[in-house]
Amino acid sequence: MRRLLAVLMFGLVATATAAHKESASLDDALAQGKREHKPVLADFQAVWCYSCYFMASHVLNGKEWNDLTGKVVFYEADADKPDDKAWMEKLDVHFLPTYVLVGPDGEELGRILAERPRTAFYKEVAGILSGDARLSKQKADAAKGSLAAVADVLDTYQLRYQGSEGMAWFETLPSMVRNVSDKDKRVALGRQRLLLLQAKDKKDENGIIDAATRVLAGRIGCDHPYVLDDLIGASKSRQPDARRSLLTPQKAPYEKYLASQVFTGTPACADQRSAVLTAADLDAALGDREGEQAVLRKGIDLSRTKLHGDLRSDRNIADNLRVYLVRAKAGEELDTLEKQLIAAYPEDYVYNYRYGRRLVENGNAAEGLPYLDAAAKKAYGANRITVTLYQVKALRALRRDDEARKRVAQTVVEEGKAFPEQTRKLQESLTSTG
């Protein structure tokens, strides 16, 4: 899925939430919640997550946010810090942002994945905090025959990326419940989404294709781009004619989705970027190069219109514009924009990093290195290792291997203990030929 942690685009989280952080760690927040009999709201985010700074600047502020943080213990978890990264693994957090609510007794109350429009986010949080979303209660109601509860539990497993666990739970239900469950559209769709997760875990392309096609036939709202992205990816090994036959039926409904949910004055779905990129990928898979460029240009033009020439007016839209230009291979426009972004956000490492990395990858190591050096002064944690990796690439291309070794040694001292796997790859970069 395009927004999985491994492939998330770089960006900056706004600092709107910082004032609400009450604890030094999630462990401290959970202890405070237990003492004060309050739920804990853990916001898993990172400085490179464009969806996260959409939420920080558009949703996690104002009266609703102030009211919410008065009812919970809020903790802002940083995916690039070792302790918070460990909690992500413990809680099975795969998306950024993910909002996990934990009760005073330590039981997870519910979670929200990815960005949401303002009204949708606070409505979902209110539902979770009301107690109606507690998994243990839902399971008990499901066993008594509530198909609404069955669907809720299946949705919870889907949010947690637990396809096999969810299907195994479903098999524990009384046969009288299971036998009638597929007559309920929400339950049938929930099961298919878990089957899709299982197929993805097994890298079963045929299973992904079958489940994704069935899910896309249901009402999945703003998840449409992600499931279609799964289908496009799984179909790559098919012969061209077979692939076109499989994907062509998706074209019309997806264009309708774009028209009603994305290319509008007030989009109903917060993640416009994934929607546009998936549309471009669909056109590319169908061999429609003109359509691919047209939808990217539509995204580019709409982004520029909304920015009104001010990149600081909306960081999320500005970064969407950058990504559309990357995907469209609009080199000159991208060069201009990235330099403007560096000037617009001087406090951040990420735009210097992006521009320097692109220059190095295009064979301009001497030009790219100063931008990477500027980024390294502001990067930290796992970010610092990533920046150093490209500094090494640039220095080795310039035959300055001694400097490359010094950069690696310094970064290993500062960050290596916390990120052993990334550190190993960094050290290997000193001798690799790639």
Image: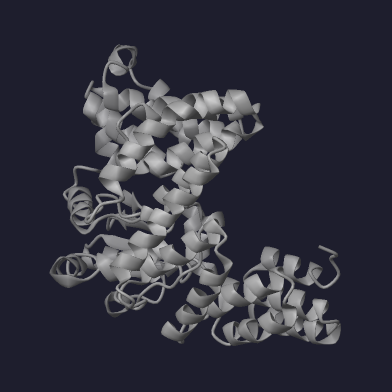
Which residue is drawn at the image coordinates 28% and 65% (left, top)?
33
Residue sitting nearer the eye, 329 or 129: 329
Closer to us: 193 or 390 = 390
Query: Quick check: 169 above or below 309?
Result: above
Above or below 64: residue 395:
below
Q: Position of residue 201 (x, y in %)?
A: 57, 37
| Residue closest to the far front | 290
Residue displayed at 42% across by 31% down: 250
Q: Is residue 323 left or right of residue 411?
A: left
The image shows residue 145, relative to residue 424, as above or below, that is: above
Left/right placement of residue 243 relative to residue 392 reads: left
The percent coordinates of residue 12 (x first, y second) are 43, 73
* Residue 234 location, quadrant: top right
In the image, residue 200 sits, relative to residue 349, either above or below, namely above
The reply to whether residue 341 is visible in this rendering is yes
Name the spot of residue 327 as percent of width and height, x first.
54, 57
Q: Is residue 22 visible?
A: no
Image-quadrant location for residue 97: bottom left
